[in-house]
Amino acid sequence: MPKFVFQLDGVLRQRKFVEQQKQREHAERQAVLVNMEGELRGLNEQVQLTNDQVRQNHLTGTLDMNFLAAHRRFLIAMQRQALALVQKMAQQKQKVEEARIELAEAAKQRKVIEKLREKHFERWRAALKHRELTEQDEIGMQLSYWNMTEVEDAEAAT
């Protein structure tokens, strides 16, 4: 039985490779975003912890205004840092979305070639089946002819 050979198999392999590459890029960008989210959570936890410590330890008795001013400066610095991080996260989300779109396009391109391969395979299989039926018809015709000639030879002999 002949083997199916897809002429664009190299193109299909290349498209699969591109799709895998786009998956890696998307995953890397997503990982950076997740790290940024973790960093933002860390900043928030640090601010909460510091506020809790100030409430528990420094708001009783005589107030140290220098300490409270330093704490306020610390909170403002943390807010600025968080704001900068949120802006970076927005940019990273845009990069993740771009990578997702590129990945979807690469998957679409791969699927196009796979559909083409399926169509070629179906045509090849139909042609093979047609050829086999033609060969079977030919064999049937030859057997029928041999049977007729044997019958005619047998009648001529008697």
Image: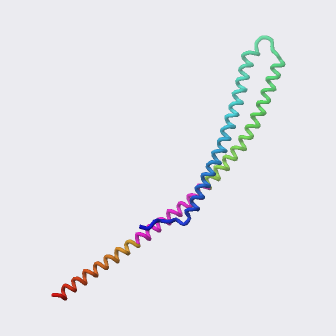
Left or right placement of residue 10 versus residue 148 in this view: right
Viewer-side residue, 12 vs 79: 12
Left or right placement of residue 64 versus residue 125 in this view: right
The number of callouts visible is 0
Residue 61 at x, y = what percent? 78, 11
Viewer-side residue, 53 vs 17: 17
Q: Say whether residue 119 is magenta.
A: yes
Residue 100 at x, y = what percent? 64, 49
The C terminus, quarter of image: bottom left
Which residue extends farthest left? 158
Q: Is residue 53 above or below residue 6?
A: above
Q: Residue at the location (33% across, 76% down)?
A: 139
- The way the protein has been coloured in the rendering is rainbow
The N terminus, quarter of image: bottom left
Q: Residue at the location (58% across, 56% down)?
A: 16
Q: Say whether residue 120 is magenta.
A: yes
Residue 33, quarter of picture:
top right
Which residue extends farthest right? 66
Left or right placement of residue 19 versus residue 127 in this view: right
Give the main secondary structure of the magenta stretch. helix
Q: Is residue 140 above or below residue 62?
A: below
Residue 42 at x, y = what percent? 69, 30
Q: Which residues are magenta?
A: 106-130
Q: Residue at the location (25% across, 84% down)?
A: 149
Viewer-side residue, 125 vs 54: 125
Q: Residue at the location (74% across, 37% down)?
A: 85
Residue 9, quarter of picture:
bottom right
Left or right placement of residue 141 versus residue 104 in this view: left
Residue 148 at x, y = what percent? 25, 82
